[in-house]
């Protein structure tokens, strides 16, 4: 009978000392599992020491292990609950650092794209990158495609006349409807057309 009880105790302690945390298990969950396994190990007055030693040795994070083992005099006075408290604090710190790195890694590409867009931006009135839109010489010209004032046909994105304010003077007529014009000839035609309109209706 005595031999049977001793065998059971050894088996319980074997399970206790071989317990390892899973990859998704927190330090608190690991500590709870050790408490449950230790209930039938009969550690008696050595219970806290056994829990502390197994807890420290079973931690996955080597940095936390080194922290708990630093200083032999302090390590001897360290309790199971004290070790658990330190491990929880370091676990939260590590998780916070990882979350911050994730946020920075996610935000960095958008910041880069915005910067490139500003540096490589072109004037939305004529499409040329050599000046700002507020300094563009086509700021008061009419687009032959939409009838909008302030940009050229070559850079027009609106096909609906109601999208912008039309010029209330004489309508602008398109020329060479069937001809394909490059960007420069399109700009010059619109300038000439606008000047011709002003002369005709002045």
Image (cartoon, rainbow, N blue to C red):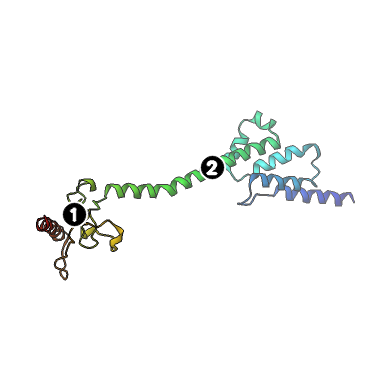
**The furthest residue to the top:** 73
Residue 163 drawn above or below residue 112: below
Q: Is residue 93 left or right of residue 119?
A: right
Category of crowding for the residue at label 2, using alpha-carbon neighbours closer than 10 angstroms: few (below 14), some (14–19), many (at least 20): few
x, y percent for residue 8: 82, 51
Residue in the image at 76% along x and 45% along y: 38
Q: Secondary structure at mark 1?
A: loop
Q: Earlier in the sequence, mark 2 or mark 1?
A: 2
Residue in the image at 69% along x and 49% along y: 19
Category of crowding for the residue at label 1, using alpha-carbon neighbours closer than 10 angstroms: few (below 14), some (14–19), many (at least 20): many
x, y percent for residue 25: 63, 50
Q: Is residue 201 left or right of residue 53?
A: left
Residue 176 has which mark? Answer: none
Is residue 91 or residue 132 the one in the foreground? 132
Q: Quadrant of residue 75?
A: top right
Q: Quadrant of the C terminus?
A: bottom left
x, y percent for residue 194: 14, 57
**The furthest residue to the bottom:** 178
Residue matched to label 2: 96
x, y percent for residue 7: 82, 51
Q: State how far apart marks 2 and 1 are (Cα).
A: 56 Å
Is residue 190 or residue 35 the one in the foreground? 190
Residue depth check, mark 2 versus mark 1: number of the one nearer the observer? 1
Residue matched to label 1: 141
């Amino acid at each position: 009978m005595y031999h049977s009880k001793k065998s059971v105790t050894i088996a319980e302690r074997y399970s206790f000392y071989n317990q390892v945390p899973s990859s998704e298990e927190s330090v608190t969950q690991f500590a709870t599992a050790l408490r449950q396994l230790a209930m039938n190990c009969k550690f008696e007055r050595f219970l806290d020491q056994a829990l502390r030693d197994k807890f420290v040795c079973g931690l996955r994070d080597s940095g936390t292990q080194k922290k708990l083992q630093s200083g032999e005099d302090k390590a001897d006075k360290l309790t199971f609950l004290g070790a658990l408290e330190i491990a929880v604090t370091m676990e939260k710190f590590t998780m916070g650092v990882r979350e911050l790195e994730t946020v920075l890694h996610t935000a960095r590409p958008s910041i880069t794209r915005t910067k490139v867009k500003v540096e490589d931006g072109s004037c939305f009135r004529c499409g040329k990158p050599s000046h700002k839109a507020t300094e563009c010489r086509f700021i008061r010209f009419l687009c032959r495609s939409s009838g909008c004032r302030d940009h050229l046909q070559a850079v027009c994105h609106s096909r609906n006349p109601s999208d912008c304010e039309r010029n209330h003077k004489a309508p602008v007529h398109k020329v060479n409807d069937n001809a394909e014009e490059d960007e420069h000839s399109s700009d010059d035609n619109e300038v000439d057309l606008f000047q011709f309109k002003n002369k005709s209706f002045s």
